Image (cartoon, rainbow, N blue to C red):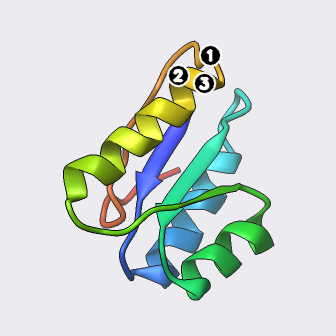
Amino acid sequence: MVPIPVHGREPLLRQTIKRLKRQTHPVHIIIMGESSSERQIAEEEGVEFLKHRNRPLGAKWQAGMNRARELEADAVMMLGSSDWLSD
């Protein structure tokens, strides 16, 4: 599972999702955000969207971890919305 709290950075978010989807093993991506544009990207890219306000930021991170726990994740990789993955 990869929870990603987002606030803006939509172009980078879309690229991060695409790169995660190209990994060898299937990855469940959870986008935690609050804007309609963030939700739209999640829907267009076929990943889960969890609506959550941006402040306090720690609560947003925790919401992603709670969701991963609910889904009984075998492993969790936390990414921020400004993190960049290479192929």
Task: Nearest to the eye among marks 1 and 3: give it.
Answer: 3
The answer to whether 59 appears left or right of 68 in the picture is left
Please name the residue shown 34% across and 39% down the image.
62
The answer to whether 11 appears left or right of 19 in the picture is left
Q: Secondary structure at mark 3?
A: helix
Residue 69 marker: 2
**Closer to us: 10 or 68:** 68
The image quarter containing residue 50 is: bottom right
Question: x, y percentage for residue 2?
Answer: 51, 40
The amino acid type found where label 1 is placed reads Glu
* Count of numbered circles in the view: 3
Q: Secondary structure at mark 2?
A: helix
Query: CA gap, disc 1 to disc 2?
Result: 5 Å
**Closer to us: 60 or 20:** 60
Query: CA gap, disc 2 to disc 3?
Result: 4 Å
Question: x, y percentage for residue 15?
Answer: 56, 69
Q: Does 33 sit above or below residue 22?
A: below
Q: Does 33 sit above or below residue 63?
A: below
Q: Around disc 2, counting alpha carbons within 10 Å, would you say few (fewer than 14), some (14 to 19), or many (20 or more)?
A: some
Please name the residue shown 44% across and 53% down the image.
4
The image quarter containing residue 57 is: bottom left
Q: Are marks 1 and 3 in contact (CB under 8 Å)?
A: yes
Question: x, y percentage for residue 44?
Answer: 78, 74
Residue bearing the label numbered 1: 72
Residue bearing the label numbered 3: 70
Q: Are marks 1 and 2 in contact (CB under 8 Å)?
A: yes
